[in-house]
Image (cartoon, rainbow, N blue to C red):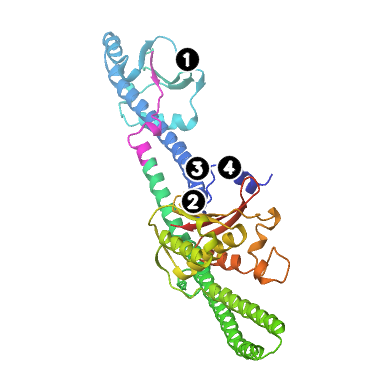
């Protein structure tokens, strides 16, 4: 298993690029901090050991001078008074006390010897020799001075250099440095990834509103500026493509309406009533196809501006207009939901989308029960239920394709043009929402669910 897959399986691993980058940098910073702290602690332990050794040598040297200078009867009293000071064990021994488990290392002996030299005294008071030994359990430094007139002065001092972490402010200083470093890392990461969030928001806005999507600022780091320039160029090309397609469809529609009108006028003068009705029906179908195709292209262009829209009133208006068009189904049209709820959107585009959905429910299911409610936080859901035959499970998504019809005949009255759901989904997705279809439980009827951001 690769390292990437291991990271992907970790539940605490965040999905945000800023958090991921910040955590990676924080881990690296923590490792560097740990290494630096370890080096500092080891160095400080060595320094504290040297300080402790010098303190022991200084204390023992300061004790040796009054002992060697005092008459022998007073030496015992001086040793007794010094015994226990700073944890030292002081004794006068008649023989060389070669106690201890090891001889102190040369650097340690040199440090102690140098500290003893700080106490100048006459030659006749100088110790004949100094034996430096130690023990490890417990850690003890043992200095034995051979007195000029015989005997030995032995001082056993506990060797306990103060650990760095016991020093005042050590932990707080480390925590403050770590916190400041972490804050600096995350501040920098947030600043560096801000253009990525801006790019994502611009892409989302471009998908919702091609005509009014703002351009990205083309400044900042070289890579960010290059990405912004590429995005703006892409957006301009998409906008130009949509505008050209809309213009083309409009031009075709305008040019085709004239010959359609001429054919309609000529058909009116036909003597054969049956033939005339067939030609007029074909012309009606052709004009309807032309109108729907132009409407589909116009919806993709999204030239309408976004304004506050009362969705509840819009739904009730569409239901009332549908009841006027299909009075036979008016008794089976119903709305359930709040009286007022406002969103930001394009009213004509939304109205066309819901008119298509409710119209399909009435046309194929002879009813339309519309309900508006909160789906989740900041998301509204509109359910449109009918009592029709439903849609085969394999076609629930394919029916949104342009010109996709479940009814295979060429009869527009029974199958439509296959653009209604495509227009509706394009309109809803342009608002940041979506449409899903599902068959009702029991196998009779269809539920069209529309999700819109609140």
Q: Is residue 160 magenta?
A: yes
Which badge, 1 or 2, comes first in the chain's sequence? 2
Task: Say which residue label 3 marks.
Answer: 35
Is residue 97 in the magenta section?
A: no
> Residue visible at 30% across and 24% down?
62
Q: Between residue 350 and residue 432, name the one nearer to us.
A: 350
- Counting from the top left corner in percent of width and height, residue 16 is at 51, 52
Residue nearest the viewer, comparing 350 with 58: 350
Cβ atoms under marks 4 and 1 closer than 8 Å? no
Give the residue at mark 1.
99
Q: Quadrant for residue 178, please give it.
A: top left
- Please tell me the numbered disc located at residue 19: 2
Q: Are marks 3 and 2 in contact (CB under 8 Å)?
A: no
Rendered location of residue 270, percent (x, y): 68, 90
Q: Earlier in the sequence, mark 3 or mark 2?
A: 2
Q: Secondary structure at mark 2?
A: helix
Across and down, in percent, residue 179 comes to 39, 45
* The residue stretch that appears in magenta: 152-174
Residue at 61 percent of width and 85 percent of height: 252
- Please tell me whether mark 3 or mark 4 is closer to you in this view: 4
Q: Earlier in the sequence, mark 1 or mark 3?
A: 3
């Amino acid at each position: 298993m690769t390292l990437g897959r291991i990271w992907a399986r970790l539940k605490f691993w965040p999905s945000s690029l800023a958090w991921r980058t910040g955590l990676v940098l924080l881990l690296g910073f923590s490792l560097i901090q740990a290494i630096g702290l370890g080096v500092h602690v080891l160095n400080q332990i060595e320094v504290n050991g040297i300080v402790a050794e010098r303190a022991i040598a200084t204390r023992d040297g300061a004790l040796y001078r009054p002992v060697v200078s005092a008459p022998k009867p007073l030496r015992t009293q001086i040793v007794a008074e010094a015994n226990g000071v700073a944890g030292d064990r002081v004794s006068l021994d008649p023989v060389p006390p070669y106690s201890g488990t090891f001889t102190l290392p040369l650097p340690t002996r040199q440090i102690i010897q140098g500290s003893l030299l700080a106490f100048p005294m006459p030659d006749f008071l100088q110790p004949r020799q100094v034996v430096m030994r130690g023990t490890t359990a417990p850690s003890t430094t043992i200095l034995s001075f051979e007195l000029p007139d015989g005997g030995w002065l032995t001082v056993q001092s506990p060797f306990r250099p103060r650990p760095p972490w016991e020093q005042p402010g050590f932990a707080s200083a480390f925590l403050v440095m770590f916190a400041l470093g972490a804050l600096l890392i995350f501040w920098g990461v947030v600043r560096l990834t801000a253009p990525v969030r801006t790019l994502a928001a611009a892409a989302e806005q471009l998908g919702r509103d091609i005509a009014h999507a703002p351009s990205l600022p083309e400044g900042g780091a070289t890579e960010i500026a290059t990405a912004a320039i590429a995005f703006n160029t892409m957006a301009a090309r998409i906008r130009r493509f949509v505008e050209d397609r809309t213009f083309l469809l409009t031009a075709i529609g305008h040019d085709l309406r004239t010959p359609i009108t001429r054919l309609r006028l000529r058909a009116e003068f036909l003597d054969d009533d049956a033939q005339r009705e067939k030609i007029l029906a074909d012309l009606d179908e052709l004009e309807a196809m032309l109108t729907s195709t132009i409407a589909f292209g116009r919806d993709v262009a999204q030239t309408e501006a976004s304004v506050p829209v009362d969705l509840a009133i819009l739904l009730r208006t569409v239901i009332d207009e549908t009841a006027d068009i299909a009075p036979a189904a008016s008794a089976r049209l119903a709305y359930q939901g709040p009286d007022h709820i406002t969103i930001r959107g394009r009213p004509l585009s939304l109205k066309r989308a819901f008119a298509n959905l409710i119209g399909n429910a009435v046309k194929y299911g002879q009813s339309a029960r519309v309900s508006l409610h909160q789906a989740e936080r900041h998301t509204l859901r509109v359910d449109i239920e009918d009592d029709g035959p439903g849609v085969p499970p394999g076609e629930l998504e394919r029916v949104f394709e342009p010109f996709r019809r479940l009814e295979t005949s060429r009869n527009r009255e029974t199958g439509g043009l296959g653009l209604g759901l495509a227009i509706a989904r394009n309109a809803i997705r342009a608002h940041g929402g979506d449409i899903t279809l599902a068959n009702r439980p029991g196998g009779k009827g269809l539920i069209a669910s529309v999700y819109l951001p609140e």
